[in-house]
Amino acid sequence: MSRCPHVAGRSGLCAGHARAYERRRGTAAERGYGWSWQVLRRRILARDPRCQEPACNEPSVEVDHIRPKVFGGSDDPANLRGTCVYHNRARRPERA
């Protein structure tokens, strides 16, 4: 995907390219984050009410795959943990 040279911001995409990216990316359900994921997500957040990173006591608001799905991880509860926004985003690779 080409970047738009005149657009500032994190994504680096103009509105037209951003819409095209979202169409190619697919819906949340198409990416495996539909209804059953939402149920599992609520269960993990109830199990881990605080961020699971060491020395962080922020509330868990996101669910993180310990071993990412792209590297063979699964949605098994043993591979999931509750994290705060900061620690979940810190582990996320940059979009190519």
Image: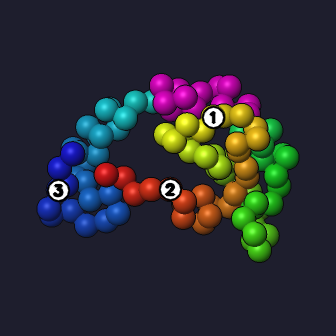
**Can you tell which of label 1 and label 3 is closer to the viewer?**
1
Q: Which of 93 and 7 is in front in this view?
A: 93
Residue 36 is a magenta residue? yes
**Splitting the image into 4 quarters, where does residue 59 fall?**
bottom right
Q: Which residue is drawn at 26% across and 37% down?
A: 20
Which residue in the structure is indicated by mark 1?
74
Three-letter amino acid code of the residue under disc 1: Ser
The residues bearing labels 1 and 3 have C-alpha atoms spaced at a distance of 35 Å
Q: What residue type is labelled 2?
A: Arg
Q: Is residue 26 visible?
A: yes
Left or right: residue 70 versus residue 37 is left
Question: Is 13 left or right of 28, judged from the image as shown?
Answer: left
Residue 42 in view in this figure: no
Q: Give the quadrant of the N terminus.
A: top left
Give the x, y percent position of residue 90: 54, 64
Dot 2: element: loop
Q: What colour scheme has been applied to the protein in the rendered image?
A: rainbow
Relative to 26, residue 11 above or below: below
Q: What residue type is labelled 3?
A: Cys
Check residue 92 in the rendering and tell me which mark sits there, or answer none. 2
Outermost front residue: 72
Q: Position of residue 45 (x, y in %)?
A: 78, 47
N-terminal of the pair, mark 2 or mark 3, is 3
Q: Tell which tag, 2 or 3, sits nearer the viewer.
A: 2
The residue sitting at 82% across, 52% down in the picture is 48
Q: Earlier in the sequence, mark 1 or mark 3?
A: 3
Which region of the structure is painted magenta? 28-40
Q: How far apart are marks 2 and 3 (CA)?
A: 22 Å
For the residues carrying marks 2 and 1, which lies nearer the camera in this image? 1
Judging by the rendered image, the residue that carries numbered circle 3 is 4
**Residue 75 image point, x, y percent:** 66, 34
